[in-house]
Image (tube, grey):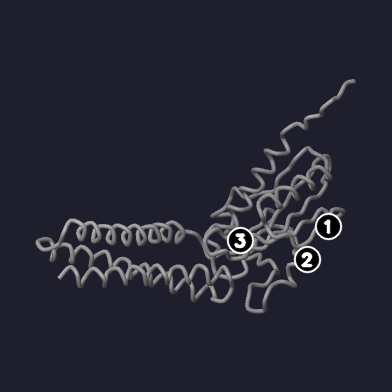
Amino acid sequence: MSRYISPVLYILMMLIGCAAFVSISGVRVGFIEPITAFDMLRKTVYAAMVLSVLTVVALIMCRKECSAGGRRFFILVGVVSFIYSVMWVSLYMQKAKLPDIYDITTDLNNPPVFINIAYLRKASEHGLTYDFSSVPVQKEYYPEISSLIVEKSFKETYIEALSLVKERGWEMVSQYPSAGVIEATARTPIFGMRNDVVIRISEQKDNVVVDMRSCSRAGKSDHGNNAERIESFLSELKDRLKKPKVNFAFRN
């Protein structure tokens, strides 16, 4: 019986893998809408759970006639499908606690304004007019998001921020050095969904203030990606601006 069951389990595992690959790569390339890809991926998780159960049942049914190689195959299929389903379920449980918000900013009173990004977005994607009704939600779930105040010069801060954007591999959209504005597009790690970023650097009294806004193009929730991006970027920028410049003096 095991010689008939093994090919079926193998085919099912390959189908799950192919469906997961198509859903993820489809969003990254742009030929599948995110909502369709998420639904497809969710079904692969259900299928992986069923496959894990079927593998256990097959291993029990074929325990007498199954060879050592056959048992190892059943165990491999069961472990792979179980790990796959647990990985996505744990990720979902972690992200499900986050609110339905997709536009995060450090300045809740006067958010940085997107300039050229507006021409890149499709009509079906989110607009760029900031929704002030989301302010209480951001304050509750992401209270740590705030403006970065530095003691460096305006020019040095802008150059360092621009350098960091390039190092992170974000797609540069526009640069306005005199206005202290940088626009770029970042992509999420797995699905590669585009999140647009605008950085605003301004001089206020004796300090330079760095504000940042990150907004997803699609989806009811960004699952915390925009807040993580802002917090990580400003934290690294702060550390880099704290480092003293090294001046090399050459003597004859």
Q: Residue furthest left?
A: 64
Label 1 sits on a secondary structure element that is: strand
Labels 1, 3: front one: 3
Q: Which residue is mark 3?
A: 187
Q: Residue at x 19, y 69 (%)?
A: 3
Q: Which residue is mark 2?
A: 115
Given residues 105 and 132, the one toward you in this image is 105
The first of marks 1 and 3 along the sequence is 1
Lateral position of residue 155 relative to residue 199, left or right: right
Residue 111 appears in view: no
Residue 111 x/y as whole percent: 72, 59
Q: Amino acid at mark 2?
A: Ile
Foreground mark, 2 or 3, reads: 3
Report the Cα–Cα distance between label 1 and label 2. 10 Å
What residue lies at 59% left-to-right and 64% top-to-bottom? Answer: 102
- Amino acid type at image mark 3: Arg
Residue 135 visible in image:
yes
Helix, strand or loop under label 2 = loop
Q: Choose top left, top right, bottom left or bottom right for residue 32.
A: bottom right
Q: Quadrant of the C terminus?
A: top right
Residue shown at 70% from the left, 54% from the top: 212
Residue 160 place in picture, x, y as percent: 76, 45
Q: Which residue is mark 1?
A: 176
**Label 1–label 2 contact, CB within 8 A:** yes
Q: Callout 1, which amino acid? A: Tyr
In the depicted structure, whether residue 196 falls above or below residue 162: below
